[in-house]
Image: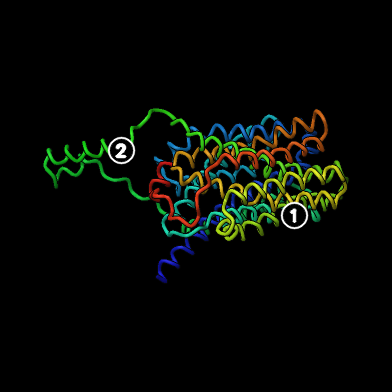
Amino acid sequence: MLRVRDDFLRAHLAIAALFCFLGFQYATWVSRLPTLKTDFELSDGRIGLLLMASGIGAAASFPLVATMMKRYGSQTLATVSAIVLGLVLAGFTLAPNFAVLLLVAALDGVAVGFLNVAMNAQGAALEVRFGRTAMSRLHATFSAGLGLAALLASGVNIVTTTLSAHFAIAAAVLALLLLLARTGMLADEPQPAPAAEQSNEQSDEQAAEQTGRAAEAAPPKRRGIPLPSRITIWMGVAMVFGTITEGAMNDWSALYLKNVVHASPQLAPLGIAVISVMMVVARLFADGWRTRFGDGPIVRIGSTVAGLGLALALLVGGVVPALIGFACVGLGIAAVTPCVYVAAARQGSDALALVAATGTTGLLAGPAVIGFVANATGLAWGMGVVAASALVVALCSTRIAWPALDKAPAPTAPDAVLHEA
């Protein structure tokens, strides 16, 4: 029993390091969007285009994820994509012009898409393998990574505004997180041997008979990408708008504080920190809330609080109301993605892969839409779209059949989650 607990804690810590890695890398460069905007003399529309390039990269990664997962496994895919994300920071520093900056952002999106699916496959397998809930706490470490990166950006800004110094420190932190992740990630289970390879122990007739029975019992395979079910589509829509809300706040909160409510350069990055701290706190308690109230009410109430809280903050205006509104978003939206990921994992690995891909696309492409709205009407209206997105999540949550948490985990085997996602 003690050995099982130790194995769970080691794997939990390693996978949490992956989540923290992704949050830290993402917030590191988006927290410096004001600097990138100044250095490259970018309009809000071009900032939106930069974020859109990252979202396009994430969307382009989806058709490749399933193949890469089956060929290399989630452990290898997570490691390689993490290394690429570390190198992307150097790309942002060395880019000579806006065109190269767009290519770097697109590469970032592809790597984020790969790591997002791989780490959530690891998280889902962790719950199945040990029979314990962990996804909310794993996502809490993603939020912790966002907050840590924002605080680092704020601290570095006090000393120097140079991107290269900031990103060099960030790269060292990412290397440590990756080393920690490598100590305990779940190994991908080997695929069952084909019947033909078992012929040394069985007669040809026995092998053929068993193969025939397996073919009858197995669901028919479809070529290409399988069509999602209606419930998976609703999960995907909820995930898209949930991650639009989360991602847009991370991308645009600093610019909103600086340009709309005229916060100081030292206070501007703290918008991300406030959101991240509230999300970490909420996600640390979210598993208990889910057990007591159920996933559906938590998602509905939380997304409503996020949408209405931000809307009121925008109407009132000012630095303090903005930070309070950001806190409402962090608190309310925190449980959305963990709950949807758990629900998707119980629908099977294809649903998990699709929902993870739509989540990554919303996280990266959604903020670009906010940029286009901000360029046309103003950033305050763009943030209003974020508030509306949170309310769309509340609507979608009423169409999802949420799993009962007091029931046994879905019979999805860990190797199926890791290999087929």
Closer to the camera, 144 or 405? 405
Find numbered disc 1 in the image and state the secondary structure of the residue it sits on. helix
Q: Position of 66 compared to 283: left or right?
A: left
What is the image's colouring? rainbow
Q: Earlier in the sequence, mark 1 or mark 2?
A: 2
Q: Is residue 184 above or below residue 382?
A: below
Task: Name which residue lies at 39% across and 50% down.
Answer: 411
Q: CA distance from mark 1 to mark 2?
A: 49 Å
Q: Which residue is mark 2?
A: 218
Q: Position of 391 compared to 9: left or right?
A: right
Instruction: Tell me if I can see residue 110 in this picture.
Output: no
Sort mark 1 into few (<14), some (14-19) or many (20+) by Cα contacts within 10 Å: many
Sort mark 2 into few (<14), some (14-19) or many (20+) by Cα contacts within 10 Å: few
Q: Is residue 313 above or below residue 56?
A: below
Task: Name which residue lies at 51% across and 49% down.
Answer: 342
Q: Position of residue 381 (x, y in %)?
A: 80, 35
Q: Amino acid at mark 1?
A: Val
Closer to the camera, 196 or 399? 399
Q: Which mark is residue 274?
A: 1
Q: Position of residue 224 (x, y in %)?
A: 42, 28
Task: Name which residue lies at 45% across and 55% down.
Answer: 407
Q: Which mark is residue 409?
A: none
